[in-house]
Image (tube, helix red, strand yellow):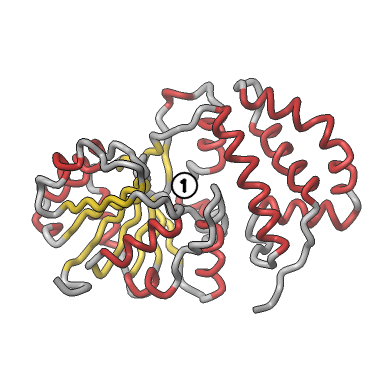
Amino acid sequence: MDHQSIDLSICIASYGNDVGALIEALLGEIEADTSLSDTEILISDQFSEAHPLQKNWTQHPSVRYHHYTELRGRAANRNHLVALSQGAQLLFLDADALPVQPNFIAQYLEHTAPRTVLVGGTAYHSDHKQWLRYKVGIQKESIPAKSRSQKPYSSFSAFNVCMDRAVAQTIAFDAKMLEYGHEDTLFGLELRHRCVPVKHLDNPAYHLGIDSDEVFMEKTKTAVLGLAALINAGKIDEDVRLYATYKRLQSWGGAVLLRLLQPVLTPWMFGRLSAGRGSVAMFDLYKLMVLCAAQPTVGRKIS
């Protein structure tokens, strides 16, 4: 089958995840709406072994499962899904996503346009409302489309996003990003630099795979150090809020103060936050102090 011979490819990057509930929800909408018949669902699973339930998922003719033992990172996984896909529009969903509304796919197709990116948003169940990861998600990610539209490229996330095929082929995710964090950030900045329209919708998916606070804090530290490396490489600008705050502090010497305090405060903060006893404000301060300690060189390079 040639590229663009179908309307939509739903691309799910997986890492040994059980995507059964997600597949069931998507197929439920596809089977109930005949206008969605030209839709395929692709799963690219980068894990040591093929998922034992994958044969159940692929019983439906529109679902394809691809397994790869070589772990190449989130960006490479998504890029591979683009190569496998056949749709004129590509809907990227993380493996731990679950559509909130029953007309989730139809809402995206109603708003698709050439060379345009649609961002549906993120929602959270209240099952983990005492966890730091849940609090951060609610305050920083579960944002209405009207608010997100004020800075359409800021804090870009490919957790739940639909785009024209030409965009996905022209602006690939940076496969050099192997560690956790910021492959989405770079993609969003590239969209802005190339003047690709980004439209925000109130069409969220639940983020179900909430890490424990300890795991979340380890990932956060990795992500901040990765951001410092990207700043040094000249790949980050003020659309990234943590960088913008760091740059303001650097201008009047506040970064030096936080760097001096960092060896004493951040181990204590890390312990409290990992144990679920810290606030989102403390979490933000922790990230800022780690970035100050890394001392990245401010200034975007012109390519």
Residue at 84% across, 41% down: 258
Horizontally, is 20 left or right of 213 in the view? Answer: left
Query: Is 121 above or below relative to 211?
Result: below
Report x, y in % for residue 249: 83, 51
Q: Which residue is tagged 1?
A: 144
Query: Is 186 above or below relative to 225?
Result: below
Horizontally, is 261 left or right of 301 in the view? Answer: right
Residue 15 falls in image quadrant: top left
Say how many tags the image has.
1
Report x, y in % for residue 126: 43, 26
Residue at 30% across, 62% down: 90
Quick one: 95 or 113, which is closer to the camera?
A: 95
Residue at 22% across, 73% down: 3
Label 1 residue SS: loop
Horizontally, is 303 left or right of 165 in the view? Answer: right
Say whether residue 150 is visible.
no
Residue 150 falls in image quadrant: bottom right
Residue at 39% across, 72% down: 167
State which quarter of the image contains the N terminus.
Answer: bottom left
* Amino acid carrying mark 1 in the image: Pro
